[in-house]
Amino acid sequence: MDSKHLLHWTVAIVSISILVFSLISQLSANSNGATYFINKLNQSLSMGNIQAAVTNQPKAHGLIVPGEEKSYYDFVSVGDWGCTEETDKTVENILKRDPNLIIALGDYSYSNSGKCWIDKIKPIESLVKIVFGNHENKGNYHLNVFESPTYSTPDAYMNQFGLKSQYYSFDYGGVHFLMMSTEVLYEKDSPQYEFVSNDLKHASENSKTKWIIVANHRTIYPPYYGAIALDTEIGKKFRDAYHPLFDLYRVDLVLQAHVHYYQRTYPLKYNAINPDVPTITDFHKNHYIKPVGPVFLTIGTGGVELGRPDNIPKPYYNAFSETGVFGILSLKIKKDGSSLEGTFYNNGDINEPYSQDTFSITKIT
């Protein structure tokens, strides 16, 4: 390299050094930080002498600032889907949320085959974990004479989602999910009860577990729907068997469906003296700090005809009740495990789903 070219390169390098130090100084004083730095650098690189200096040089690395990674996990949950136009809106609503995981709460196709529902959820199927409802348990569930014969066997769903049992558990980040079945044996001497008891014990003792979320189909609170006595019986027996375990092992949320509305309870503790009258441990409507007892949520709003308001109980322990809209529950849980925010998004305007109910739980203050 002759002296003339060497001089040109020396001037270019000095110019770039001065520019970078200048931009770093401005970056530290500018509220827009990295964006400001990139914009100014791009503008400066278009200047004649600098542009000539970097021509034919390898592209610089580390100048592009990636988009900020989410600081939370987003889980979505809903049950009682059906195969209706409203089901399609539910899928669209879920896609708008861009969740990490979808907890489906049972009662899917409402037919003797699971195909129509499985077809409808193709865009989100890889994210779906399921619990089993009564409509997926023909042969296990004893049909009431007044009920529709739109029931299928669990086999197709077991195969589709790679399951060997209707109850199972898994971890996602610091969240432990326990998927239970109200449709197979669940009494205290049953295999499911033994599994649940051991599973919750291990989860509660695991230092990596920040949240425990239980999902099942039938409602525990309230443990009945309309005049169907079987629902009342199953709900109460399930409640009396498992709510004490939920309290013991500090379950945070219980997700349920079966009845076609959205409701959310206050944090509730089991009342052994009178189980029909659970103890509210925090009377705040929307925001809870280290509550005692789980919050029970009913999200049976996936697409099947909504329940009639006059047929839907609104007991004293409900913090929120909405009987007239389809929609989904979104649960945003911070990755550090410090807090959770739940929001019910109405299907009403699919382009701009709006919040119908929002609540939060804080564990670390």
Image: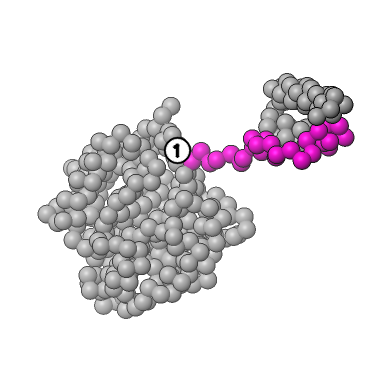
Q: Is residue 59 left or right of residue 71?
A: right
Which element is circle 1 on? loop
- Asked if residue 220 lies in the magenta stretch, the reply is no
View extreme (front): residue? 2
Q: Which residue is mark 1?
A: 335
Q: Is residue 116 positioned above or below 59 on the image?
A: below
The disc labelled 1 sits on which kind of residue? Lys
Q: Position of residue 80 (x, y in %)?
A: 40, 64
The residue shown at (88%, 35%) is 48
Question: Secondary structure of the magenta portion, mostly?
Answer: loop
Query: 354 or 231: which is nearer to us?
Result: 354
| In magenta segment, residue 64 | yes
Q: In the picture, which quadrant includes the C terminus?
A: top left
Placement of the N terminus among the 4 image quadrants: top right
Taking 63 as reference, is 153 above or below it? below
Residue at 25% over, 61% down = 165
Where residue 135 sits in the image (x, y, percent)? Answer: 32, 70
Q: Residue at x 44, y 60 (%)?
A: 126
In this orientation, does residue 253 appear?
no
Quick one: 31 or 77, which is closer to the camera?
A: 31
| Left or right, 270 with reference to 124 | left
Which residue range is magenta in the image?
45-72
